[in-house]
Amino acid sequence: MSGTVDHDVVIIGAGFGGMGAAIEFKRQGYDNILIVDREDDLGGTWHVNHYPGLAVDIPSVTYSYSFEPNPFWSRLFAPGPELKRYAVHVADKYDLHRHMRFGKAVEGARWEEEEGHSGGGHWVVNLSGGETLTTRYLVAATGYLSQPYRPEIPGIDEFAGDVLHTAKWDDSYDLSGKRIAVIGTGATAVQLIPEVAKLAAEMTVYQRTPIYVTSKTDFAIPKSVQRIFARFPLTQRAARLVSTSLLELLMVAGVLRYRQLRRFNERAGSLAIRHMKHHIKDPVLREKLTPSYSFGCKRPTFSNDFYPTFNLPHVSLETTPIERFDADGIVTTDGKKTTIDTLVLATGYNIWDVNFPAFEVIGREGRDLGKWWRDNRFCAYEGVSVPMFPNFLCLASPYSYSGLSYFTTIEYQMQHIARLFGEVRRRQARGFEVTEKANEEFLDRMTVLLGDSVFYNGNCGPVRSYYFNQHGEAAILRPTSTYNTRREAGSFALTDYSFS
Ligand SMILES: Cc1cc2nc3c(=O)[nH]c(=O)nc-3n(C[C@H](O)[C@H](O)[C@H](O)COP(=O)(O)OP(=O)(O)OC[C@H]3O[C@@H](n4cnc5c(N)ncnc54)[C@H](O)[C@@H]3O)c2cc1C
Protein backbone atom coordinates (compact mmCIF):
# COMPACT_ATOMS: atom_id res chain seq x y z
CA MET A 1 0.00 0.00 0.00
CA SER A 2 3.04 2.32 -0.02
CA GLY A 3 1.88 4.41 -3.01
CA THR A 4 3.90 7.58 -3.07
CA VAL A 5 5.80 6.96 0.17
CA ASP A 6 9.00 4.96 0.68
CA HIS A 7 7.59 2.85 3.52
CA ASP A 8 4.29 1.92 5.08
CA VAL A 9 5.82 1.91 8.53
CA VAL A 10 9.05 3.36 9.90
CA ILE A 11 9.93 2.29 13.44
CA ILE A 12 12.69 4.12 15.26
CA GLY A 13 14.51 1.88 17.71
CA ALA A 14 15.50 -1.78 17.37
CA GLY A 15 15.06 -2.69 21.03
CA PHE A 16 12.38 -5.00 22.38
CA GLY A 17 9.79 -2.20 21.97
CA GLY A 18 10.54 -1.58 18.28
CA MET A 19 10.77 -5.30 17.57
CA GLY A 20 7.42 -5.93 19.28
CA ALA A 21 5.80 -3.18 17.17
CA ALA A 22 7.32 -4.67 13.99
CA ILE A 23 6.01 -8.14 14.86
CA GLU A 24 2.53 -6.67 15.35
CA PHE A 25 2.61 -4.68 12.08
CA LYS A 26 3.64 -7.85 10.25
CA ARG A 27 0.70 -9.67 11.86
CA GLN A 28 -1.51 -6.84 10.57
CA GLY A 29 -0.32 -7.55 7.04
CA TYR A 30 2.35 -4.86 6.55
CA ASP A 31 5.68 -5.82 5.10
CA ASN A 32 7.18 -2.57 3.85
CA ILE A 33 8.52 -1.82 7.30
CA LEU A 34 11.81 -0.15 8.12
CA ILE A 35 13.36 -0.26 11.59
CA VAL A 36 16.04 2.40 12.02
CA ASP A 37 18.52 2.47 14.90
CA ARG A 38 21.56 4.66 15.50
CA GLU A 39 23.44 1.73 17.08
CA ASP A 40 25.25 -0.92 15.03
CA ASP A 41 23.03 -3.83 16.06
CA LEU A 42 19.64 -4.74 17.54
CA GLY A 43 18.66 -5.16 21.18
CA GLY A 44 18.45 -1.55 22.41
CA THR A 45 19.23 -1.52 26.16
CA TRP A 46 20.65 -5.04 25.94
CA HIS A 47 22.97 -4.20 23.06
CA VAL A 48 24.14 -0.86 24.44
CA ASN A 49 24.75 -1.98 28.02
CA HIS A 50 27.47 -4.51 28.82
CA TYR A 51 28.92 -3.22 32.07
CA PRO A 52 30.15 -5.81 34.61
CA GLY A 53 27.26 -7.30 36.61
CA LEU A 54 24.51 -6.40 34.09
CA ALA A 55 21.42 -8.56 34.62
CA VAL A 56 17.66 -8.17 34.57
CA ASP A 57 16.01 -7.00 37.76
CA ILE A 58 12.72 -8.68 36.91
CA PRO A 59 12.61 -12.53 36.77
CA SER A 60 13.32 -13.61 33.20
CA VAL A 61 10.20 -15.75 32.89
CA THR A 62 8.32 -12.44 33.11
CA TYR A 63 10.88 -10.17 31.41
CA SER A 64 10.35 -11.67 27.93
CA TYR A 65 7.57 -11.74 25.32
CA SER A 66 4.70 -13.94 26.56
CA PHE A 67 4.26 -15.29 23.02
CA GLU A 68 7.96 -16.19 22.75
CA PRO A 69 9.02 -17.84 26.00
CA ASN A 70 12.65 -18.81 26.35
CA PRO A 71 12.91 -22.08 28.29
CA PHE A 72 16.69 -21.78 28.48
CA TRP A 73 17.29 -18.82 30.82
CA SER A 74 20.28 -19.87 32.88
CA ARG A 75 19.14 -18.07 36.02
CA LEU A 76 15.95 -16.67 37.51
CA PHE A 77 17.44 -13.22 36.83
CA ALA A 78 19.30 -13.76 33.56
CA PRO A 79 22.59 -11.95 32.90
CA GLY A 80 22.60 -9.19 30.26
CA PRO A 81 24.25 -11.13 27.40
CA GLU A 82 21.39 -13.69 27.48
CA LEU A 83 18.92 -10.88 26.82
CA LYS A 84 20.95 -9.77 23.82
CA ARG A 85 20.96 -13.37 22.50
CA TYR A 86 17.21 -13.59 23.11
CA ALA A 87 16.70 -10.39 21.07
CA VAL A 88 18.67 -11.92 18.16
CA HIS A 89 16.62 -15.11 18.42
CA VAL A 90 13.36 -13.11 18.25
CA ALA A 91 14.61 -11.16 15.22
CA ASP A 92 15.54 -14.46 13.50
CA LYS A 93 12.27 -16.17 14.25
CA TYR A 94 10.02 -13.25 13.28
CA ASP A 95 12.07 -12.37 10.21
CA LEU A 96 12.96 -8.89 11.39
CA HIS A 97 16.60 -8.59 10.29
CA ARG A 98 15.75 -7.71 6.71
CA HIS A 99 13.74 -4.70 7.93
CA MET A 100 16.54 -3.25 10.04
CA ARG A 101 18.96 -0.50 9.22
CA PHE A 102 21.70 0.48 11.66
CA GLY A 103 24.09 3.36 12.21
CA LYS A 104 21.51 6.02 11.37
CA ALA A 105 20.20 8.42 14.00
CA VAL A 106 16.81 9.97 13.38
CA GLU A 107 17.18 13.71 13.82
CA GLY A 108 13.63 14.79 13.14
CA ALA A 109 10.28 13.91 11.60
CA ARG A 110 7.67 16.19 10.09
CA TRP A 111 4.05 15.51 9.12
CA GLU A 112 3.17 16.61 5.62
CA GLU A 113 -0.40 16.96 4.42
CA GLU A 114 -1.07 15.58 0.98
CA GLU A 115 -2.97 17.80 -1.44
CA GLY A 116 -6.22 16.31 -2.65
CA HIS A 117 -6.59 13.76 0.18
CA SER A 118 -8.86 14.86 2.96
CA GLY A 119 -6.80 14.31 6.07
CA GLY A 120 -4.22 12.34 4.09
CA GLY A 121 -0.53 12.83 4.60
CA HIS A 122 2.76 11.21 5.42
CA TRP A 123 5.82 11.60 7.60
CA VAL A 124 9.14 12.89 6.33
CA VAL A 125 11.93 11.48 8.47
CA ASN A 126 15.40 13.05 8.58
CA LEU A 127 18.32 10.74 9.22
CA SER A 128 21.87 11.62 10.20
CA GLY A 129 23.97 12.21 7.10
CA GLY A 130 21.27 14.27 5.40
CA GLU A 131 19.11 11.41 4.08
CA THR A 132 15.31 11.67 4.20
CA LEU A 133 12.65 8.95 4.12
CA THR A 134 8.91 9.11 3.78
CA THR A 135 6.47 6.83 5.55
CA ARG A 136 2.72 6.52 6.03
CA TYR A 137 3.02 5.51 9.71
CA LEU A 138 5.73 6.49 12.15
CA VAL A 139 6.51 4.68 15.40
CA ALA A 140 8.95 6.05 17.98
CA ALA A 141 10.28 3.11 20.02
CA THR A 142 13.27 4.99 21.34
CA GLY A 143 13.06 3.75 24.95
CA TYR A 144 13.04 5.65 28.23
CA LEU A 145 16.54 4.81 29.28
CA SER A 146 18.43 5.44 26.09
CA GLN A 147 19.94 8.94 26.40
CA PRO A 148 22.84 8.64 28.89
CA TYR A 149 23.15 11.40 31.47
CA ARG A 150 26.56 12.91 32.20
CA PRO A 151 26.52 15.18 35.26
CA GLU A 152 27.76 18.71 34.82
CA ILE A 153 30.16 18.95 37.73
CA PRO A 154 32.70 21.78 37.67
CA GLY A 155 36.05 20.57 36.32
CA ILE A 156 34.76 17.19 35.06
CA ASP A 157 36.13 17.87 31.58
CA GLU A 158 39.56 18.68 33.05
CA PHE A 159 39.78 15.34 34.88
CA ALA A 160 42.83 13.69 33.33
CA GLY A 161 42.13 10.08 34.31
CA ASP A 162 39.94 7.57 32.50
CA VAL A 163 36.17 8.04 32.36
CA LEU A 164 33.67 5.24 31.77
CA HIS A 165 29.88 5.59 31.54
CA THR A 166 27.90 2.42 32.26
CA ALA A 167 26.02 2.93 28.97
CA LYS A 168 29.29 3.21 27.01
CA TRP A 169 31.37 0.57 28.75
CA ASP A 170 34.79 -0.26 27.32
CA ASP A 171 35.11 -4.05 27.74
CA SER A 172 38.85 -3.89 27.14
CA TYR A 173 39.39 -1.50 30.06
CA ASP A 174 41.27 -3.14 32.93
CA LEU A 175 39.98 -2.01 36.33
CA SER A 176 42.58 -4.05 38.23
CA GLY A 177 44.59 -2.16 40.79
CA LYS A 178 42.98 1.19 39.95
CA ARG A 179 41.75 3.84 42.40
CA ILE A 180 38.17 4.17 41.23
CA ALA A 181 35.30 6.54 41.94
CA VAL A 182 31.76 5.47 41.11
CA ILE A 183 29.16 8.22 40.94
CA GLY A 184 25.60 7.03 41.43
CA THR A 185 23.68 4.46 43.44
CA GLY A 186 20.74 3.66 41.16
CA ALA A 187 19.72 0.21 39.93
CA THR A 188 22.67 0.01 37.51
CA ALA A 189 25.19 1.03 40.18
CA VAL A 190 23.81 -1.66 42.50
CA GLN A 191 24.77 -4.28 39.90
CA LEU A 192 28.09 -2.71 38.99
CA ILE A 193 29.58 -1.72 42.37
CA PRO A 194 30.21 -5.27 43.71
CA GLU A 195 31.92 -6.21 40.42
CA VAL A 196 34.16 -3.12 40.34
CA ALA A 197 35.10 -3.69 43.99
CA LYS A 198 36.48 -7.13 43.11
CA LEU A 199 39.18 -5.53 40.95
CA ALA A 200 39.77 -2.03 42.31
CA ALA A 201 42.67 -1.18 44.60
CA GLU A 202 40.46 1.47 46.19
CA MET A 203 36.88 2.38 45.45
CA THR A 204 34.86 5.39 46.59
CA VAL A 205 31.15 5.44 45.87
CA TYR A 206 29.57 8.91 45.66
CA GLN A 207 25.95 8.72 46.69
CA ARG A 208 23.37 11.50 46.36
CA THR A 209 20.25 9.49 47.21
CA PRO A 210 20.35 6.05 48.90
CA ILE A 211 18.34 3.34 47.17
CA TYR A 212 16.03 0.71 48.67
CA VAL A 213 17.57 -2.70 47.96
CA THR A 214 15.86 -5.90 49.02
CA SER A 215 17.36 -9.37 49.00
CA LYS A 216 17.38 -11.18 45.66
CA THR A 217 16.04 -14.71 45.40
CA ASP A 218 18.18 -15.66 42.45
CA PHE A 219 19.43 -19.08 41.46
CA ALA A 220 20.65 -21.06 38.48
CA ILE A 221 17.80 -22.83 36.68
CA PRO A 222 18.90 -26.47 36.44
CA LYS A 223 19.14 -27.97 32.95
CA SER A 224 16.47 -30.50 33.94
CA VAL A 225 14.02 -27.67 34.68
CA GLN A 226 14.95 -25.95 31.40
CA ARG A 227 14.13 -29.18 29.58
CA ILE A 228 10.76 -29.38 31.37
CA PHE A 229 10.04 -25.75 30.38
CA ALA A 230 10.91 -26.59 26.75
CA ARG A 231 8.90 -29.80 26.66
CA PHE A 232 5.87 -28.62 28.64
CA PRO A 233 5.51 -24.85 27.99
CA LEU A 234 2.55 -24.70 30.39
CA THR A 235 4.98 -25.20 33.29
CA GLN A 236 6.91 -22.09 32.33
CA ARG A 237 3.67 -20.19 31.85
CA ALA A 238 2.71 -21.15 35.39
CA ALA A 239 6.09 -19.87 36.65
CA ARG A 240 5.51 -16.64 34.71
CA LEU A 241 2.06 -16.24 36.22
CA VAL A 242 3.44 -16.55 39.75
CA SER A 243 6.30 -14.10 39.14
CA THR A 244 4.10 -11.61 37.28
CA SER A 245 1.45 -11.71 40.00
CA LEU A 246 4.00 -10.99 42.74
CA LEU A 247 5.40 -8.06 40.76
CA GLU A 248 1.88 -6.78 40.16
CA LEU A 249 1.12 -6.95 43.87
CA LEU A 250 4.29 -5.00 44.65
CA MET A 251 3.48 -2.34 42.06
CA VAL A 252 -0.22 -1.91 42.73
CA ALA A 253 -0.23 -2.32 46.51
CA GLY A 254 3.21 -0.88 47.21
CA VAL A 255 3.29 2.09 44.85
CA LEU A 256 0.04 2.89 43.03
CA ARG A 257 -2.51 2.41 45.84
CA TYR A 258 -0.39 3.93 48.58
CA ARG A 259 -3.29 5.93 49.97
CA GLN A 260 -5.33 2.78 50.61
CA LEU A 261 -2.51 0.31 51.29
CA ARG A 262 0.16 2.37 52.95
CA ARG A 263 1.04 -0.48 55.33
CA PHE A 264 2.11 -2.64 52.40
CA ASN A 265 4.46 0.08 51.17
CA GLU A 266 5.94 0.54 54.64
CA ARG A 267 6.41 -3.22 54.97
CA ALA A 268 8.29 -3.36 51.65
CA GLY A 269 10.47 -0.44 52.76
CA SER A 270 11.22 -2.02 56.13
CA LEU A 271 12.16 -5.32 54.47
CA ALA A 272 14.79 -3.43 52.48
CA ILE A 273 16.06 -1.65 55.62
CA ARG A 274 16.23 -4.96 57.46
CA HIS A 275 18.23 -6.41 54.56
CA MET A 276 20.64 -3.49 54.76
CA LYS A 277 21.01 -3.77 58.56
CA HIS A 278 21.65 -7.48 58.27
CA HIS A 279 24.77 -6.70 56.23
CA ILE A 280 25.86 -3.34 57.64
CA LYS A 281 26.74 -3.14 61.32
CA ASP A 282 28.49 0.25 61.40
CA PRO A 283 25.85 2.80 62.57
CA VAL A 284 27.33 5.65 60.52
CA LEU A 285 27.25 3.58 57.35
CA ARG A 286 23.73 2.40 58.17
CA GLU A 287 22.60 5.97 58.52
CA LYS A 288 24.12 6.91 55.18
CA LEU A 289 22.50 3.97 53.40
CA THR A 290 19.03 4.55 54.85
CA PRO A 291 16.64 6.29 52.42
CA SER A 292 14.77 9.28 53.84
CA TYR A 293 11.94 8.96 51.32
CA SER A 294 9.08 6.50 50.90
CA PHE A 295 9.65 3.15 49.21
CA GLY A 296 8.83 3.40 45.49
CA CYS A 297 9.56 7.12 44.95
CA LYS A 298 12.74 5.96 43.17
CA ARG A 299 12.98 2.57 41.47
CA PRO A 300 14.00 0.03 44.17
CA THR A 301 16.01 -3.03 43.25
CA PHE A 302 17.24 -6.43 44.44
CA SER A 303 20.79 -7.48 45.31
CA ASN A 304 22.57 -9.72 47.77
CA ASP A 305 26.06 -8.37 47.27
CA PHE A 306 25.55 -4.59 47.12
CA TYR A 307 25.51 -3.88 50.88
CA PRO A 308 28.32 -6.33 51.84
CA THR A 309 30.59 -4.48 49.39
CA PHE A 310 30.65 -1.48 51.75
CA ASN A 311 32.21 -3.61 54.48
CA LEU A 312 35.32 -4.24 52.38
CA PRO A 313 38.39 -2.37 53.65
CA HIS A 314 39.17 -0.76 50.29
CA VAL A 315 35.61 0.53 49.70
CA SER A 316 34.19 3.76 51.08
CA LEU A 317 30.90 5.55 50.73
CA GLU A 318 30.94 9.33 50.30
CA THR A 319 27.72 11.25 50.85
CA THR A 320 29.11 14.79 51.03
CA PRO A 321 28.21 16.50 47.74
CA ILE A 322 30.90 16.80 45.09
CA GLU A 323 32.20 20.33 44.67
CA ARG A 324 34.55 19.87 41.72
CA PHE A 325 36.99 17.69 39.86
CA ASP A 326 40.72 18.28 39.82
CA ALA A 327 42.88 16.73 37.12
CA ASP A 328 43.64 13.83 39.47
CA GLY A 329 40.63 13.49 41.71
CA ILE A 330 37.35 14.58 43.25
CA VAL A 331 36.89 17.29 45.87
CA THR A 332 33.76 17.29 48.05
CA THR A 333 32.19 20.40 49.57
CA ASP A 334 33.93 19.73 52.91
CA GLY A 335 37.28 20.22 51.12
CA LYS A 336 38.21 16.51 51.17
CA LYS A 337 40.03 15.35 48.07
CA THR A 338 40.11 11.75 46.86
CA THR A 339 42.76 10.97 44.27
CA ILE A 340 41.57 8.56 41.60
CA ASP A 341 42.70 6.94 38.36
CA THR A 342 39.28 6.11 36.97
CA LEU A 343 35.87 7.71 37.11
CA VAL A 344 32.85 5.48 36.56
CA LEU A 345 29.62 7.33 35.83
CA ALA A 346 26.61 5.29 36.87
CA THR A 347 24.52 8.41 36.52
CA GLY A 348 21.75 6.95 34.46
CA TYR A 349 19.71 8.61 31.77
CA ASN A 350 18.22 11.93 30.87
CA ILE A 351 14.53 11.40 30.30
CA TRP A 352 12.84 14.74 30.70
CA ASP A 353 15.25 17.12 28.92
CA VAL A 354 16.46 15.25 25.87
CA ASN A 355 14.03 12.34 25.65
CA PHE A 356 10.25 12.59 25.28
CA PRO A 357 10.56 12.71 22.35
CA ALA A 358 14.08 11.53 21.50
CA PHE A 359 14.08 13.54 18.25
CA GLU A 360 12.18 16.55 16.96
CA VAL A 361 8.62 15.61 15.95
CA ILE A 362 6.53 18.21 14.12
CA GLY A 363 2.87 17.36 13.66
CA ARG A 364 -0.08 19.09 12.07
CA GLU A 365 -0.03 22.89 11.87
CA GLY A 366 3.66 22.84 12.81
CA ARG A 367 3.07 21.60 16.37
CA ASP A 368 6.36 20.63 17.99
CA LEU A 369 5.71 17.64 20.27
CA GLY A 370 8.58 18.30 22.69
CA LYS A 371 7.70 21.97 23.07
CA TRP A 372 4.01 21.26 23.37
CA TRP A 373 4.56 18.68 26.12
CA ARG A 374 6.85 21.05 28.00
CA ASP A 375 4.60 24.10 27.63
CA ASN A 376 1.47 22.15 28.57
CA ARG A 377 1.37 18.76 30.24
CA PHE A 378 3.02 15.52 29.22
CA CYS A 379 0.42 13.05 27.98
CA ALA A 380 -0.14 10.37 25.37
CA TYR A 381 -3.55 8.75 25.03
CA GLU A 382 -3.31 5.18 26.36
CA GLY A 383 0.46 5.70 26.33
CA VAL A 384 0.63 5.58 22.53
CA SER A 385 -0.86 8.47 20.60
CA VAL A 386 -1.08 12.26 20.69
CA PRO A 387 -3.63 14.65 19.09
CA MET A 388 -2.29 16.73 16.17
CA PHE A 389 0.18 13.93 15.38
CA PRO A 390 -1.64 11.77 12.84
CA ASN A 391 -0.38 8.29 11.98
CA PHE A 392 2.16 8.52 14.79
CA LEU A 393 2.64 6.12 17.71
CA CYS A 394 4.94 7.12 20.51
CA LEU A 395 5.76 4.04 22.55
CA ALA A 396 8.13 5.52 25.12
CA SER A 397 5.73 8.19 26.17
CA PRO A 398 4.10 9.67 29.27
CA TYR A 399 1.88 7.29 31.25
CA SER A 400 2.82 4.35 29.08
CA TYR A 401 4.93 2.30 31.51
CA SER A 402 2.54 -0.25 33.00
CA GLY A 403 3.65 -2.77 35.61
CA LEU A 404 7.17 -3.57 36.64
CA SER A 405 8.30 -5.63 33.64
CA TYR A 406 8.64 -3.49 30.54
CA PHE A 407 7.33 -6.39 28.45
CA THR A 408 3.87 -5.73 29.87
CA THR A 409 4.07 -2.28 28.32
CA ILE A 410 5.36 -3.58 24.99
CA GLU A 411 2.61 -6.18 24.74
CA TYR A 412 -0.31 -3.92 25.60
CA GLN A 413 1.00 -1.46 23.01
CA MET A 414 1.06 -4.30 20.47
CA GLN A 415 -2.55 -5.01 21.41
CA HIS A 416 -3.43 -1.33 20.91
CA ILE A 417 -1.80 -1.40 17.45
CA ALA A 418 -3.81 -4.53 16.56
CA ARG A 419 -7.12 -2.93 17.52
CA LEU A 420 -6.32 0.41 15.90
CA PHE A 421 -5.11 -1.06 12.62
CA GLY A 422 -7.97 -3.55 12.55
CA GLU A 423 -10.22 -0.48 12.36
CA VAL A 424 -7.98 1.29 9.82
CA ARG A 425 -8.36 -1.80 7.61
CA ARG A 426 -12.09 -2.16 8.19
CA ARG A 427 -12.68 1.43 7.15
CA GLN A 428 -10.12 1.22 4.35
CA ALA A 429 -8.65 4.34 5.91
CA ARG A 430 -5.10 5.58 5.55
CA GLY A 431 -4.95 7.95 8.45
CA PHE A 432 -5.82 8.03 12.14
CA GLU A 433 -5.54 10.64 14.83
CA VAL A 434 -6.58 10.52 18.46
CA THR A 435 -9.08 13.19 19.42
CA GLU A 436 -8.25 16.04 21.81
CA LYS A 437 -11.23 15.00 23.93
CA ALA A 438 -10.05 11.41 24.34
CA ASN A 439 -6.56 12.57 25.21
CA GLU A 440 -7.80 15.05 27.81
CA GLU A 441 -10.12 12.52 29.39
CA PHE A 442 -7.29 10.01 29.59
CA LEU A 443 -5.01 12.58 31.22
CA ASP A 444 -7.72 13.56 33.71
CA ARG A 445 -8.23 9.93 34.62
CA MET A 446 -4.51 9.28 35.07
CA THR A 447 -4.18 12.43 37.19
CA VAL A 448 -6.98 11.34 39.53
CA LEU A 449 -5.56 7.81 39.86
CA LEU A 450 -2.05 9.10 40.51
CA GLY A 451 -3.55 10.95 43.47
CA ASP A 452 -3.61 7.58 45.27
CA SER A 453 0.04 6.77 44.57
CA VAL A 454 3.12 7.04 46.71
CA PHE A 455 4.30 9.82 44.42
CA TYR A 456 1.71 12.24 45.82
CA ASN A 457 0.90 10.75 49.22
CA GLY A 458 4.23 9.40 50.32
CA ASN A 459 7.34 11.33 51.18
CA CYS A 460 9.01 11.77 47.79
CA GLY A 461 10.40 15.24 48.54
CA PRO A 462 13.99 14.21 49.30
CA VAL A 463 14.41 12.23 46.08
CA ARG A 464 15.09 13.42 42.54
CA SER A 465 14.02 10.35 40.61
CA TYR A 466 13.38 10.01 36.91
CA TYR A 467 9.72 9.29 37.65
CA PHE A 468 9.21 13.04 38.12
CA ASN A 469 9.31 15.57 35.31
CA GLN A 470 10.20 19.27 35.34
CA HIS A 471 6.63 20.13 36.35
CA GLY A 472 6.91 17.86 39.40
CA GLU A 473 4.48 15.35 37.87
CA ALA A 474 5.12 11.61 38.06
CA ALA A 475 4.14 11.22 34.43
CA ILE A 476 5.84 7.96 33.44
CA LEU A 477 4.05 5.14 35.19
CA ARG A 478 0.50 4.35 34.25
CA PRO A 479 -1.32 4.27 37.59
CA THR A 480 -3.54 1.27 36.83
CA SER A 481 -3.13 -2.46 37.22
CA THR A 482 -1.66 -4.23 34.20
CA TYR A 483 -4.93 -6.12 33.98
CA ASN A 484 -6.76 -2.83 33.45
CA THR A 485 -4.12 -1.64 30.97
CA ARG A 486 -4.44 -4.77 28.86
CA ARG A 487 -8.21 -4.73 28.99
CA GLU A 488 -8.29 -1.15 27.72
CA ALA A 489 -5.74 -1.90 25.00
CA GLY A 490 -8.16 -4.47 23.63
CA SER A 491 -11.35 -2.48 24.10
CA PHE A 492 -10.68 1.29 23.93
CA ALA A 493 -13.46 3.23 22.17
CA LEU A 494 -12.66 3.38 18.47
CA THR A 495 -14.45 6.72 18.43
CA ASP A 496 -11.49 8.06 20.41
CA TYR A 497 -9.77 8.21 17.03
CA SER A 498 -10.77 9.96 13.85
CA PHE A 499 -10.01 8.06 10.64
CA SER A 500 -9.44 9.45 7.17
C1 LIG B 1 20.81 -1.27 32.38
C2 LIG B 1 19.35 -1.42 32.23
C3 LIG B 1 18.69 -2.52 32.78
C4 LIG B 1 17.32 -2.65 32.65
N1 LIG B 1 16.71 -3.71 33.23
C5 LIG B 1 15.37 -3.83 33.14
C6 LIG B 1 14.68 -4.93 33.76
O1 LIG B 1 15.29 -5.80 34.37
N2 LIG B 1 13.34 -4.95 33.68
C7 LIG B 1 12.62 -4.00 33.02
O2 LIG B 1 11.39 -4.09 32.96
N3 LIG B 1 13.25 -2.99 32.38
C8 LIG B 1 14.58 -2.87 32.44
N4 LIG B 1 15.21 -1.83 31.83
C9 LIG B 1 14.43 -0.89 31.03
C10 LIG B 1 14.62 -1.25 29.55
O3 LIG B 1 15.11 -0.13 28.91
C11 LIG B 1 13.33 -1.78 28.97
O4 LIG B 1 12.98 -2.94 29.71
C12 LIG B 1 13.37 -2.18 27.50
O5 LIG B 1 14.57 -2.84 27.15
C13 LIG B 1 13.14 -0.98 26.64
O6 LIG B 1 13.03 -1.39 25.32
P1 LIG B 1 12.78 -0.31 24.18
O7 LIG B 1 12.90 -1.01 22.89
O8 LIG B 1 11.55 0.43 24.47
O9 LIG B 1 13.96 0.75 24.39
P2 LIG B 1 15.52 0.56 24.25
O10 LIG B 1 15.93 -0.81 24.56
O11 LIG B 1 16.13 1.68 25.02
O12 LIG B 1 15.78 0.78 22.70
C14 LIG B 1 15.65 2.05 22.12
C15 LIG B 1 16.46 2.07 20.85
O13 LIG B 1 16.18 3.30 20.20
C16 LIG B 1 17.38 3.77 19.62
N5 LIG B 1 17.27 5.22 19.47
C17 LIG B 1 16.99 6.15 20.42
N6 LIG B 1 16.95 7.38 19.87
C18 LIG B 1 17.20 7.21 18.55
C19 LIG B 1 17.29 8.10 17.44
N7 LIG B 1 17.09 9.42 17.57
N8 LIG B 1 17.58 7.59 16.21
C20 LIG B 1 17.77 6.26 16.03
N9 LIG B 1 17.71 5.37 17.05
C21 LIG B 1 17.42 5.84 18.28
C22 LIG B 1 18.45 3.40 20.63
O14 LIG B 1 19.70 3.32 20.00
C23 LIG B 1 17.95 2.03 21.11
O15 LIG B 1 18.54 0.98 20.40
C24 LIG B 1 16.58 -1.67 31.95
C25 LIG B 1 17.23 -0.56 31.41
C26 LIG B 1 18.60 -0.43 31.55
C27 LIG B 1 19.27 0.77 30.96
Image (cartoon, rainbow, N blue to C red):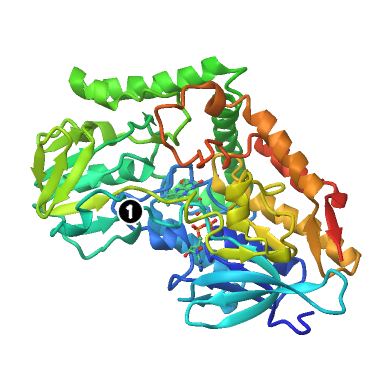
Can residue 110 be spotted in the picture? yes
Number of numbered callouts drawn = 1
> In the depicted view, which residue is nearer to us: 125 or 274?
125
Place residue 291 in its image quadrant.
top left
Q: 483 above or below 328?
A: above
Of 226 and 345, the residue lying toward us:
345
Viewer-proximal residue among 116 and 236: 116
Q: Residue 206: which quarter of the image? A: top left
Please report the residue visible at 52 percent of the width from the left and 53 percent of the height from the top.
Answer: 71
Q: Is residue 443 left or right of residue 174?
A: right
Q: Position of residue 470 (x, y in %)?
A: 50, 42
How crowded pointer 1 is (Cα within 10 Å; few <14, some 14-19, many 20+) is rated as: some
- Give the residue drawn at x 41%, y 24%: 293
Question: Seen in the image, is 297 located left or right of residue 369?
Answer: left
- The image shows residue 53 at horizontal and vertical percentages of 31, 49
Disc 1: which residue = 150
Asked which secondary structure carries label 1, the reply is: loop
Q: Which residue is painted at 69% across and 29% down in the image?
A: 448
Q: Which sits in the foreground, 118 or 6?
A: 118
